[in-house]
Amino acid sequence: MKQLAIITLTFFAIACGPASNDSGSENETKNDMPARAELPLNENDTITIVGMGATMNEMKYDTKVLRVPANKEITIELINQSTDASMPHNLVVIQKGTADDVGQGGLQYKENNYVNPDDENVIANTPVAQMGETVYVTFTTPAAGDYDFICSYPGHWGLMNGRFVTR
């Protein structure tokens, strides 16, 4: 009877364990956020992303991977659901591997949403959204490939980041 209980518990642990994502990258599940499959664009070609958290350790987006069509005009809607007024967020689509450069480079551009307007690594960015605020950016997605997205608000890009994949 004890062996049957162990086998049953093992089965349920395996069956109910975390599902693997199709990307093959462990980094995409960081912060327990799932990779979205093909992103659902609504009839206005808008993607909704949520920024959240009450502390520096809790801040995150609701996904780690955004997959969108290449060379298509889309709108990103960023909803800041943070529960602390000290947690403003934005979303900046950037060239792959440039998060530190873009984040550091934007520190002196508070009036430009913490994004250097001359930074060639920046593809698009939303304004900074305060707690409870929703902001938008409309742009044409880049050519097929892998890019990144970050929150460039000071100190946030280390945790608030992900992959922006165009196909």
Image (cartoon, helix red, strand yellow):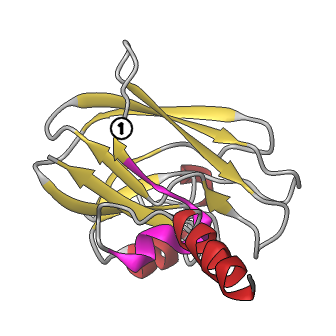
Q: Is residue 2 left or right of residue 110?
A: right
In this rendered view, identify the residue nearer to me: 96 or 61.
61
Name which residue lies at 30% across and 60% down.
Answer: 22
Taking the image as shown, residue 38 lies to the left or right of residue 78, namely: left
Q: Residue 128: percent from the left, percent from the top?
A: 63, 47
Up-down relation of residue 115 to residue 47 (above or below): below
Check disc 1 and give the amino acid type: Leu
**Total numbered labels:** 1
- Residue found at the far bottom of this picture: 3
User: Is residue 104 visible to the viewer in this orientation of the structure?
Assistant: yes
Neighbours of disc 1 within 10 Å: few (<14), some (14-19), many (20+): some
Q: Quadrant of residue 47?
A: top left
Q: Please identify the quarter of the rendering in which residue 132 is found.
A: top right
Q: Where residue 62 sits in the image (x, y, percent)?
A: 59, 51
Residue under the point 66% across and 32% down: 134
Q: Locate residue 60 relative to residue 36 in the image: left or right.
A: right
The residue beneath circle 1 is 39
| Residue found at x 66% / y 79% | 4
Tell me residue 144's x, y (percent).
Answer: 11, 51
Relative depth, front residue between 160 and 152: 160
Queried whether the magenta region covers residue 30, the answer comes back as yes
| 147 or 108: nearer the viewer | 147
Residue that appears at 75% across and 86% down: 2
Magenta part of the chain: 25-36
Q: Is residue 59 magenta?
A: no
User: Looking at this rendering, what residue extends furthest in the front direction?
Assistant: 1
Q: Position of residue 11 (x, y in %)?
A: 56, 72
Please tell me whether residue 73 is drawn above or below residue 125 in the rendered image.
above
